[in-house]
Amino acid sequence: MNIALLPAVEQRRLLAAGEISAVELLDSCAAQYERLNPSLNAVVLTRLDHARREAQATDDAHVRGEPLGPLHGLPVTIKECIDWVGTPSTWGDPRHADYLPAEDADVVKQLRRAGAVLYGKTNVPKHLGAWQAYNDIYGRTNNPWNVERTAGGSSGGSAVAVASGMASLEIGSDIGGSIRWPSAHNGIAGLKTSFGVVSPHGHSFPGHEGIVDNNVLGPMARTVADLELLLPVITEPHILLAPPEKQRLDQFRVGVLLDNPIGTQSAEMTAMLEAAVATLVDAGVEVVAPPPSDFLVRTHEVGLELVRAAATGPSDPPRAEDLDRYASGGRDYDALAAQAQRVTYREWIDLNNERERARLRWRDYFADVDLLLAPVVPTTAPPHDTDRRFAERTITIDGAEHSILEQWFWAGLANPTYLPSVALPVGVASDGLPVGIQALGPFMGDRLVLGFATLAERILGHPIEELHQRLEQ
């Protein structure tokens, strides 16, 4: 038995029972790192000697009978952009290769107080601005299911570290699918939390201190139960998340939207998601209509402008042709992004007001519907594409080339309106790569979506076990 590949909840049980030690578990995860990371490049820096001292101190405290934290002895890695004193937070930008934060991020403090053993940082794209993990400092992260495929992003290194057993748990971030996209591509579970649930302090671009609108931190793990273990640790102390009142799948009413109103997706993936929904229906889930497409498309457009306004720096000036196209009514990605780069505060207020109206419509929708089920991504993990700029990248869907940006609809569905969304795997496609689905819920309904996902996972299975069999061969 490779203890590094067990669910974190099972590792925690073994640690508490004294059947394994924190040092043994760390050494097991470190062995995964040493064996697999040369080909995967997920963990880009480590402090293993420091971590072993902390693991030993954790074991010593256990022997003395001291109370155990909820994450007692679990080896954890974090996304490179999260501040951890003694390690750089470069955001994949060579200009900040030497930037060392002076203070730990709040989530780092919370992890360590809970007994986690933090040992490394994981790879990101430059400025977290792509659905893959590649930058000029650390290079490219590869998918453990197929190293010729992308791991997703921007929390791509995070997902690979968890999927491959290099870490028990991870902290990622999500402004436009950056937790859910790599979770789907690597066959793990990831929670995009409600805006405000997790402190963003210590997750700011070097030299910036303000909160970035739409952006959240959240847990990533091999199972939904592991997400439930980690979420209370990183929840802001003044936030009280209501536990789910429903304990069976036949108590849930869910909307289902599997067709992208602005893009295309793989027919095989759609069929697999339909089969997963049918399995849930057989278990008693009631399916109802999703919100109207015109509302979702307009919310997507507003959300894209808000994200690009929040995440684009002065070094990326808009192109005149994109601005002209926006002025003529064009609403493609480049046109929306260009407009967002020059938006005035008055225009931002107007966008924010439209966002708030959308939030009210979601509130009304979730008054008698529990969740919305939707895809996370249009295909299984595509081949690496590190040469073209983000807006020019394409993916092949059923033999035809499509802009990857059509899929911002799925990726950003929850972000502009602050909704929680959990990604969980539903199976493995014919190309040997995992497929995932997301469940969106009402604002501050994080435990509701996790509660549903826990029940769903029990009948949809754990495709990650297939990866673990491959890795152990």
Image: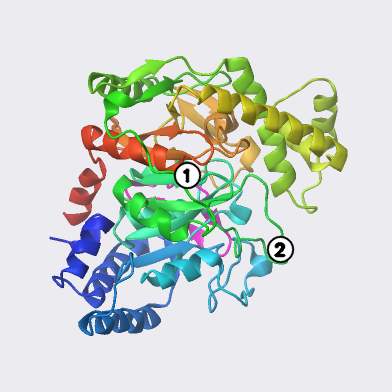
The type of residue carrying mark 1 is His
Front in this rendered view, residue 182 or 296: 296
Pick the front one: 301 or 30: 301
Residue 186 appears left or right of 321: left
Residue 140 covered by magenta stretch: yes
Q: Is residue 278 above or below residue 5?
A: above
Q: State the CA–CA distance, disc 2 to disc 1.
A: 33 Å
**Residue 136 percent coordinates (x, y):** 58, 61
Q: Which residue is mark 2?
A: 209
- Residue 181 picture location, percent across and down: 46, 41
Given residues 148 and 300, the one toward you in this image is: 300
Crowd band around label 1 with a 10 angstrom C-alpha radius: few (<14), some (14–19), many (20+): many
Q: Is residue 430 above or below residue 101?
A: above
Q: Tag 2, which secondary structure?
A: loop
The relative height of residue 92 versus residue 371 in the rendered view (above or below) is: below
Which is more N-terminal, label 1 or label 2? 2
Q: Position of residue 59 (x, y in %)?
A: 25, 80
Q: Is residue 24 magenta?
A: no
- Quadrant of the snapshot with the N terminus: bottom left
Give residue 389's position: percent from left, percent from top: 64, 43
Front one among 103 and 248: 248
Quadrant of res 157: bottom left
The residue at 46%/29% (across/down) is: 378
Q: Is residue 236 visible?
A: yes
What residue do we see at 52% from left, 46% from top?
Answer: 178
Image disc number at residue 77: none
Per the rendered image, the range of residues in magenta is: 134-154
Q: In this rendering, would 423 be left or right of 428?
A: right
Instruction: Mark 2 vs mark 1: give the one in front.
Output: 2
- Where is mark 1, residue-wise? 384
**Mark 1 secondary-structure assignment:** loop
Q: Residue at x 23, y 85 (%)?
A: 64
